[in-house]
Amino acid sequence: MKTYRFYGWETADVKDRDGLTPRDYYDILSDIWCAETCAPRMRDKWSADNPTLGQCSVTAFLLQDMFGGKVYGIRRPDGNYHCFNDVNGCVFDLTSEQFGGEVLDYTDCPEQLREIHFAKEEKRRRYEYLRAKVMEKKCALQ
């Protein structure tokens, strides 16, 4: 089995309707994440060496579309939330690598709602772009 570095990869065995797991989506997204899908406030720090930087909310809500479950957020020192997924107790965070060796606490985190996150037009557009690219890639793989 391939080794991943995102939080929860070892137990991320939930499957979407096409039989794909979060690990499969990580592989797909690894070719899509870019400065354009990164949060604007972090774009100047985004690089191919740290592709998950600034990608958490758009990625977590995209995975919620695929697997269901809920999106939760870890409050960060700057007041923003780092988003991750919980699908019936299967917790995973495809964008956790952006924090390097920092250990995040995934317990007792508040639920995040797309209506609030996507009230920001730029975030909704980034999500739609990411979703379209993932769907294109999935179609090409089938």
Image: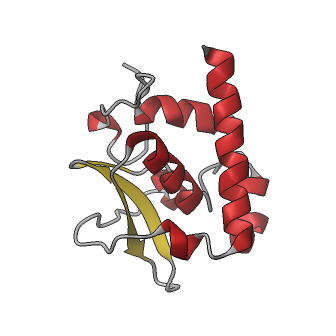
Specify whether residue 32 is in view.
Answer: no
Q: Position of residue 65 (x, y in %)?
A: 48, 46
- Residue 77 in the image: above or below residue 25: below
Q: Which residue lies furthest to the top in this view?
A: 142
Which quarter shows the N terminus? Answer: top left
- Left/right placement of residue 89 relative to residue 106 reads left
Q: Nearer the viewer, residue 30 or 69?
A: 69
Q: Position of residue 19 (x, y in %)?
A: 40, 22
Coloring scheme of the render? secondary structure
- Left/right placement of residue 46 relative to residue 1 reads right
Q: Which of 60 and 44 is in front in this view?
A: 60
Specify whether residue 7 is in view.
Answer: yes
Quarter occupied by residue 44 = bottom right
Quarter occupied by residue 18 = top left
Q: Which residue is drawn at 61% across and 69% down?
A: 118
Quarter occupied by residue 3 = top left
Count of numbered marks:
0
Q: Which residue is drawn at 60% across and 57% down?
A: 55
Q: Which residue is drawn at 46% across and 84% down?
A: 77
Q: Where is residue 66 in the image (x, y as percent from the top left)?
A: 46, 40
Q: Where is residue 6 in the image (x, y as percent from the top left)?
A: 42, 45
Which quarter shows the C terminus? Answer: top right
Q: Residue at x 67, y 63 (%)?
A: 124
